[in-house]
């Protein structure tokens, strides 16, 4: 594909620079945009998002990794619904970043239907075929093939929620029967993956506070099918310092393995324990 001469600063894909920056700050995850004619990888640990959404043998193989990991690391067998919850988190967390990181960094929102994404979890490698993306009117990328211009920031936030729902909705259908959770609980997990993934990456980028504000505007509540708000709030540390935290809309079920070691944003974790976990050791 040849880019117009008036766009010398735009990469081959409108989201490539965002994915490059993601890997720079978080080397454990690499997102690669496939070009025209490039084949989606398969075999050797690869799984298509559409295969996970189908809920069959490919999902069985995917979850076998989580089952073995729990047994190896914790010396006990997890319940099948706990294994499925872990597996969903380990897919949905990076998958959401395919949408939220380009939005956060460049105000570009790719559409990523399940047939266009593949994942190699052992390598932390995602591939995505970007056929369409939304952007603002003043974005130079608006002249690129596949660009769809929206009116303003509010419309772009709607594009973020729509793109994630388009991708995760079928994936939740695939995982759902194994998780023993209703639709509201599943979409609560999706809400958490959007918020906590970008919040973490923004911290690495040195832009945590901006991300918190952006996520609060993205998820103010009543944004169906998502559940709840971004859930941020402030605690006070032992020296009067501000400690940002949030309340998850769902539970990852890690407490079923280690009841005494809940996550810092878990609804089961009291504020006293949160302050202790968030305060650096002297």
Image: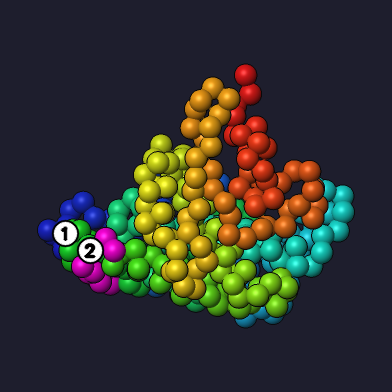
Residue range (magenta) = 146-154
Q: Is residue 238 left or right of residue 149?
A: right
Residue 133 seen from this side: yes
Q: Is residue 173 left or right of residue 33?
A: right
Residue 159 point in image, percent of width and height: 35, 68
**In the image as oriented, which residue stretches furthest toward the top?**
282
Q: Is residue 273 above or below residue 176?
A: above
Residue 105 point in image, percent of width and height: 33, 50
Q: Which residue is mark 1?
A: 138
- The circle drawn on residue 102 is none
Helix, strand or loop at mark 2 = loop
Q: Nearer the viewer, residue 244 or 102?
A: 244
CA distance separating discs 1 and 2: 10 Å
- The circle drawn on residue 152 is 2
Determine if the magenta segment contains residue 177. Answer: no
Q: Is residue 134 left or right of residue 174?
A: left
Number of marks in the image?
Answer: 2
> Image quadrant for the N terminus?
bottom left
């Amino acid at each position: 594909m040849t880019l117009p001469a008036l766009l010398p600063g735009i990469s081959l894909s409108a989201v490539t620079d965002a994915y490059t920056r993601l890997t720079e700050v978080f080397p454990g995850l690499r997102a690669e945009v496939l070009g025209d004619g490039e084949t989606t990888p398969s075999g050797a640990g690869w799984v298509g998002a559409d295969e996970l959404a189908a809920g069959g043998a490919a999902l069985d193989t995917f979850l076998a990794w989580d089952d073995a990991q729990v047994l190896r690391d914790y010396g006990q067998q997890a319940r099948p619904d706990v294994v499925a919850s872990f597996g969903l988190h380990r897919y949905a967390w990076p998958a959401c970043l395919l949408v939220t990181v380009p939005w956060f960094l460049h105000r570009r929102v790719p559409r990523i239907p399940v047939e266009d994404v593949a994942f190699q979890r052992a390598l932390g490698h995602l591939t995505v075929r970007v056929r369409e993306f939304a952007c603002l009117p003043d974005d130079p990328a608006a002249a690129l093939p596949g660009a769809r211009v929206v009116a303003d920031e509010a419309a772009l936030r709607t594009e973020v929620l729509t793109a994630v729902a388009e991708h995760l909705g079928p994936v939740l259908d695939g995982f759902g029967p194994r998780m023993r959770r209703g639709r509201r609980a599943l979409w609560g997990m999706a809400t958490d993956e959007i918020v906590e993934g970008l919040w973490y990456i923004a911290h690495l980028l040195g832009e945590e506070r901006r991300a918190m504000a952006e996520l609060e505007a993205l998820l103010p509540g009543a944004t169906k099918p998502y559940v709840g708000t971004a859930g941020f709030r402030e605690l006070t540390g032992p020296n009067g310092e501000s400690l940002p935290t949030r309340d998850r809309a769902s539970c990852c079920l890690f407490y079923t393995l280690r009841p005494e070691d809940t996550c810092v944003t878990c609804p089961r974790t009291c504020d006293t324990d949160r302050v202790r976990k968030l305060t650096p050791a002297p």
